[in-house]
Each structure stands twice: as C-alpha cells, then as structure tokens.
Image (cartoon, rainbow, N blue to C red):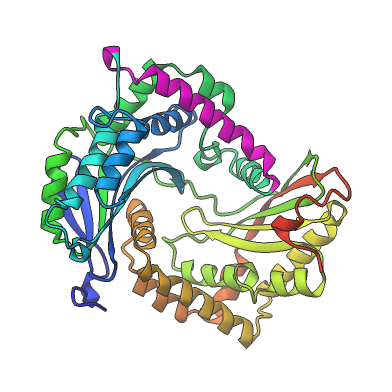
Amino acid sequence: MTVFETRAQFTPSRHTVGQGMVLYARQTDRFKVGLLSMSMAKQTEAARVPPTSLLLSTLKRGTEKYPSLAAINERLDNLYASSLVTRNYRCGDRQILGISTEFLDSRYLNDPEAGDILDGCAEMMSQMLLHPLTEENGLLCARLVDSEKVHLCDSIRSQQNNPRLWAALRFAEVLCANEPCGIPLHGGVDQIMSLTREQLRACHRDWLDSSELIFFYIGPEEPARVAEVLCRRFADFRPITVEQIPPTTVIRRADKVRSVTEEMAVSQGKLHLGFRTDATVHDPTYYAMAMANEVFGASPASKLFMTVREEKSLCYSIGSSYDLYKGIMKVSCGIDPDMKDVACEEIMRQWDRMRRGEITDEELHAAKQSLENNYRTIEDNPHAIEGFYYGRLLEGVDMTVEDCRAGLAAVTREQIVEAASAVTLDTVYFLKGTCPDGGEEADEDGELE
C-alpha cells in the first residue's frame, strides 16, 4: 500500500457532484498518470443501439470550442499529451456510453505555465458530451455525421473479414437471442445509413435527460477538489429524471441444446459452446464457478488446453471464459471443419471430469495462482480498477478486489464440483470453413501440433 492507502480505502469513495452526477474517487500516489472517466448506462435496446453508436462517433469529431479533430488534438497536446477516448461497450444487459481521459500527474511537471491539467481534461470531456459541434436547430454538423456514417459502416462490414471476431459476434447473437445482450452493439449498415440528424439529436437528449452520470477518478488529487472541478465543468448537465435500468436477465438453466451451423469461405472452423452456469456475482457459488472455469479452460494449465489441444491435437486454439454478470460460460476454439463432432465430444468429456471431481492438486493450484495473479494485477492498472468497481456498482454488489482474492483462495475441490454440477449446455455454434487448405488463419490461431 502507498502513503494514501489503507485497507478501508480499497473501495473508491463516493461523492455527490451535482444533480444526477456521482464521483467515485480512489486517491492513490501509485501511478504517474491520473484517470478520469464518465459513464452513462441504459438497458440495451434495438432501437437505441444504432443512433447511439453513430452519435458517439460524431461527438468525438468536434465541439463548440474545439470544432475539429485538429483543434481537439492541439488542446490535448497542450495538456501534456493527455488522451481522450470515447467508449461504447456492454456490461451484462446494459449499454455503456462513456468518455475517459488520462493525464500526467502534476507532481511530475516542472512548468509553472502548465495550468490545471485536471481542469483542462474535465473541460474537454464536458465539451464533447454537452457541447458538440452543431448547425441550425441544434442538429449535429451534417459533414461530420455523413463522414462518420461511412466510417462506422466500414467498421461493421470489416467484422466479417475477421473469422474469429465474426464467429464470436454471431455466437453471442444466437446464444442470447431473446436477451438484451444478444442485440448487436453497433447496429447494421442499413440502420446506420438511414439515420437522420433529428434522430441523433433525440438520442443525445434521451441519454442526457434520463441518465445518471458516473465519474471515476484514480490519482493523487483530493476527491473534494475533483468533485469541485466536475461540478463546475458539468454544470449544464441537468437530467429531468434518472431512468431505472432493469436487472440483468439471468437464465439459470438450459432446457434444451440449440445447434447452429453457418458457413464462411475460410479454411478453419470456429466452434463455440455456451453454458448456463446458475452462478453470477450475486450468488454464493460465484467464486467456485470462477475457479471451475479457470480449471476447465481459462488458464494455460487448464483441461481444455492441456488435453484437447496439446495431448489430442483436436484444435488450433481453445479457451473458456465466464461472464460473472450473465452467469454464462463460453468455450471457443479453432478447428479443422471436419473435426467438429470429435472436438465437441472431447470438450464435454472434460466437463464431465469436472463434475466427477477429477481435478488434480496441480490443476487446482495452477488455477488459484492464475486467478490470484489476475486480481492482484488489477491494482496496477487504473482502467482495471475502474472496470472492476463500475461493473459491480451497476449490479449493486459491494465487493473489493481483496474480497475476491480471499474468496477465490478459499475455494475447495468439493465446491467446484457442486458448482459444475449445476451447469447446462445451451448452445453449440459452428462457423464452418469451406475453403480447404486456405491456411489464412495460421497466423491467427497457430499451427495444429
């Protein structure tokens, strides 16, 4: 721990900034840069997704005070090369719209003319969110909107040029077809191209009028000073009401297995299996399920990697992941197209071994060491700290990094077996490669040994 930190300060402190605005601050002298972020969350809805994506792309192109990318970049350079990025991502069923900035800690500056870098970065964020570049009737600049339509549509189309990414996106749509998180995050090309500036203005107002603005600050500044800067710079943020977001949908058990096969002109096949675990961050079995996933396929010493790939050579790459908010475990692997059934059988055979408690002391130790390292290094990254606490904040879970480390360290083999026994297979998705001997994914997934 550093001079500012005690055990009680692991959780960021909460400070009211203004109407509909809250700051979570972690005062620490650990980093040479400060992180300041703002985020708004809403339930993912099909009608809101396309205009939100285009809106966020357009906001970062110009503001009232800084009307071009050149002006924005010049101002950031004057703030000692501070960074400013927009964010559009998902947490559970929620769509998150945000802006974050990183800036040099003033302790490392020997420049009396530097000014207040924290204040300057907060001003840039408020300009981008609250004061975008507009034309008549408050509509976003037509030139910027048209340009961003082209860029966004090119980005959407390019997803199909990456087989691994495309398979993962399609798998998520199939697995969560009747859930908000199954809605594609950026919309489709036709939807983007048909959007009007009036729709973007309405989308912008929807976010501003009915969202809570959550700030995270991680750095050496006193939280009270950060709150004062934000209160002043975001004085124009006045939501009419804060929309209540429904809890994340959690399907506890799969009643049947869905199987979907699609084709693409590539050489490798992309196989994905989706499981319902009956365990989320809210449940007492959470730590055991996280450990089960690590033993199964998340670490380099896992059963899937050591057996399915290394011992049996059934795939080019393989791994598993666990969504603690949705209670979903996913397995993904790159395989020869004709190996789908054999690979599926072996993956399920390894999960059956988990259910029976066939977990060696070495596997359990390696999994605990892997997760301990993952959670310990969260404290070394301001973005990781923000991500850890913001996700749990949205879910209403009071949990620190230290809580997780202790909870995972205490998991027993018997608890892993109990958690694994409640898991059911929901979906098998296969993107079948139709180009034999193409070899175009060798650099991506590695050679089959």
Res. 210 visible in picture: no
Q: Residue furthest bottom?
A: 361
Q: Residue at x 63, y 37 (%)?
A: 158
| Left or right of residue 174, residue 390 in this image | left
Q: Residue at x 36, y 35 (%)?
A: 60
- At which x and y percent is residue 149? 50, 25
- At which x and y percent is residue 227? 14, 51
Give the quarter of the image for residue 39.
Answer: top left
| Left or right of residue 170, residue 194 in this image | left
Taking depth in this image into account, of 205 and 180 the one nearest to the observer is: 205
Q: Is residue 304 above or below residue 431?
A: below
| Residue 156, magenta (yes or no) | yes
Taking depth in this image into account, of 70 and 349 the one nearest to the observer is: 70
Q: Is residue 378 above or below residue 358?
A: above
| Residue 204, magenta (yes or no) | no
Question: Looking at the rendering, in which quadrant would you find the N terminus?
Answer: bottom left
- At which x and y percent is residue 265? 80, 40
Taking depth in this image into account, of 320 and 154 the one nearest to the observer is: 154
Give the quarter of the image for residue 56.
Answer: top left
Q: Is residue 246 above or below residue 404?
A: above
Task: Look at the image and give the residue range highlighted in magenta.
Answer: 136-163
Give the quarter of the image for residue 203.
Answer: top left
Q: Which secondary structure is most common in the magenta stretch?
A: helix
